[in-house]
Amino acid sequence: MKSLGYLVVTQFKNQLRELLHRPSRLITAIFVVAMLAVVLFAGGQTPQAGEEMLPLSLLIGVVVAFYAVMFFMIARSGLNSGASFYTMADVSMLFPSPIPTRTILLYGLVRQLGTSVLLGFFLIFQYSWLHNLFGLELPGLIAILAGYAVTIFTAQITSMALYSVTAGDDRRRAAAKKLFAGAVVLALAGAGVPMALGSGGLLDRAAGAASSPFTLLIPCGGWLGQAVSTAMGGNPLLAAGGLLLAAAYIAAVLVLILRTDSDFYEDVLQATEVSHSAITAKKEGKMQDVVPKHVKVGKIGIGRGSGADAFYYKHKLENRRARIFLLDGMSLIMAVCLLFFGYLMKDAGVAVVFAFAAYLQFFTTITGRWIKELTLPYVYMVPQPAFRKLLAVCREQVRSMAAEAVLVMVLLGLLLGASPLVIAAMVAARIGYGLLYMAGNILVERVLGGMVNKILIFSLYFLILLLVAAPGIILGIVSGILLGTAAGLAATMVWNLLASAVIAFACRDILNCAELNNK
């Protein structure tokens, strides 16, 4: 135990020394702290008098749903690949050492809990709008962050337990899938029964359901959601019950991991190797796809396209095999969040809701097959003009983005009661922002592609986008005030299209040589 304590303390000291001796990381840390201070200061301002707040019980319901979705998504991986709390260095040094398995497991759990807290760090940047919309105070936000960390931690150990129990046994895996499906049904019942029995509008029913004992039927999400509710004025009895259920569940899963017949070391070794490969690829600036063990190929060959156009049909084929029709998993989650936010803020107007939509779109546009294609050598080997290849690589993303804009913005516009002209402007403006985000990604890849510190690249990418989008935002606000909402959205779309075209043309040689974006 003393050796593991020494290892943890030494690793922490080394991370601090590396931070001080690497200016890029120090600058990134200062930037993040400064942005955090701005968010907390701006969000801590007292709302204007007379401004109506949504009930905190509704926020508890949102937290319960968020926790539950994250838990089930992560835990489900245990039916296929499992999870690991360790690095390859741990596998090489700790596993062969004469340290008890329980002690090594405890070491991994402590490390994972700290990692889970860091994963929830992004929630702090949501403080401003949560404070203005629900009146959430800082202690409540910290409670939400702590609950999120425990949710991720619980999902990870659940994934490890599922893999340990079902590895190499098809019957156990089939039984585990049925139990998992039963847990999902139980969660839906815990949310649906109080909604069906409630009275009033949708918001009133959702707020009432969040305070119902039925939420304790929702595995992990309901327990931890109620546990953090005391910081937001929730029911203390439900919070205590949720905390006890979560603690009992974690203890039971840990006992299952330790007492299962399978080899603990063998169970985590494969997952550790997979995570190590992904981390190494990120450090080297590469991207890795998660390839399933069993792939239904179906039709073989691209079948259409020649030259640069083959990349477009290649991406379409990959989407079909990944069962992506219009929206992938991330886009679907963001769309649901946006529609929910639009329902809550429909009285605030189209401009406010669209601003939030543009914010969420940033996270869905910076990922995609087109970005991965730029990191592979094949696109550089095609004997076609560089600019044509760049347009062909981006073509499928533009098509998907346009389809998503039509689907999501039309639903959002109908939800807000907007006119057909405003809805059309919303669709066009969303496409414009998507093209701007893509162009910004190309610019950053062209200028900063050789940098190793991806956090610093992401920060600079965000700043560059703010600078490029600022004139369009100002133009849109002025046009919206003078000519109406549709004109304001159209003005931002025009600016974003022009800026995207200029950036794409300026970076047209990015695919001439693989070394160009590694300077």
Image (cartoon, rainbow, N blue to C red):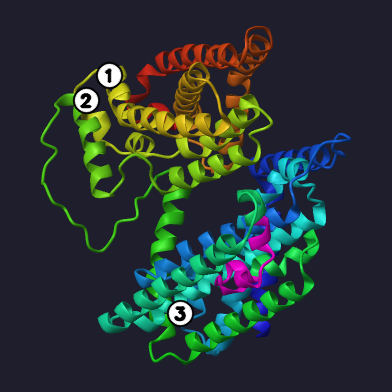
The disc, 3 or 1, on the residue closer to the chain's N-terminal end is 3
Quadrant of image for the N terminus: bottom right
Q: Amino acid at mark 2?
A: Ala
Residue 403 visible in rendering: yes
Q: Which residue is located at x 87 percent, y 39 percent?
A: 46
Q: Nearer the viewer, mark 3 or mark 1?
A: 3
The residue under label 3 is 161
Residue 488 position by quadrant: top right
The residue under label 1 is 388
Residue 417 position by quadrant: top right
Secondary structure found at label 1 = helix
Q: Is residue 107 left or right of residue 319?
A: right
Return the x and y of residue 509 as percentages of the image width and height. Answer: 36, 19
The residue under label 2 is 308
Secondary structure found at label 2 = helix
CA separation in Å, label 2 and label 1: 7 Å
| Residue 66 within the segment the image draws in magenta | no
Residue placed furthest toward the top: 482
Q: Amino acid at mark 3?
A: Ala
**Marks 2 and 1 close (CB-CB < 8 Å):** yes
Q: Nearer the viewer, residue 437 or 447?
A: 437
Return the x and y of residue 512 as percentages of the image width and height. Answer: 31, 22
Q: Is residue 382 left or right of residue 373?
A: left
Q: Which residue is located at x 72 percent, y 73 percent?
A: 238
Which stretch did the figure color magenta?
206-223
